[in-house]
Image: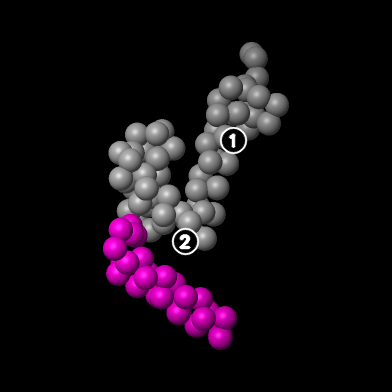
């Protein structure tokens, strides 16, 4: 019970910090920028804000790591690599 209360407290404090510090984006905004960030399409200012959020938010670092891992699995499966998840049988 205490663990859940502490986690809830930490999430609220993080949200408050991210919403009140100048030049910070929210986790929701981070999620909206992630594809453009990985594609290198964010303008310099937005990329700076994105990377600043990444430095202070362990949740979004995990999210980005998992997102990249998912993309790598998808690419491997699409290319029929050794770790490919999609196998087609020849008739």
Q: Residues within 10 Å of mark 2 (few under 14, many from 20)?
A: few
User: Which residue was labeled with disc 1?
Assistant: 73
User: Which residue was labeled with disc 2?
Assistant: 56
Q: Is residue 85 visible?
A: yes
- Frontmost residue, 15 versus 24: 24
- The image's mark for residue 90 is none
Vertical side of 85 occupied by 53: above or below: below
- Residue 32: % across, % down: 34, 48
Q: Residues within 10 Å of mark 1 (few under 14, many from 20)?
A: some
- Residue 67: % across, % down: 51, 44
- Residue 10: % across, % down: 47, 75
Q: Which of the 4 quarters of the picture holds residue 33?
A: top left
Q: Say which of marks 2 and 1 sits in front.
A: 2
Vertical side of 43 occupied by 6: above or below: below
Q: Is residue 31 visible?
A: no
Q: Is residue 50 left or right of residue 45?
A: right
Vertical side of 10 occupied by 49: above or below: above
Label located before the other in sequence (2 or 1): 2
Number of numbered discs visible in the structure rendering: 2
């Amino acid at each position: 019970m205490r663990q859940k209360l502490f986690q809830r407290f930490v999430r609220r404090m993080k949200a408050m910090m991210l919403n009140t510090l100048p030049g910070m984006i929210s986790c929701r905004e981070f999620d909206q920028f992630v594809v453009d960030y990985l594609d290198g399409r964010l303008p310099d200012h937005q990329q700076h804000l994105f990377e600043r959020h990444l430095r202070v938010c362990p949740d979004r670092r995990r999210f980005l790591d998992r997102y990249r891992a998912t993309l790598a699995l998808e690419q491997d499966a699409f290319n029929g690599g050794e770790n490919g998840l999609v196998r087609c049988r020849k008739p």
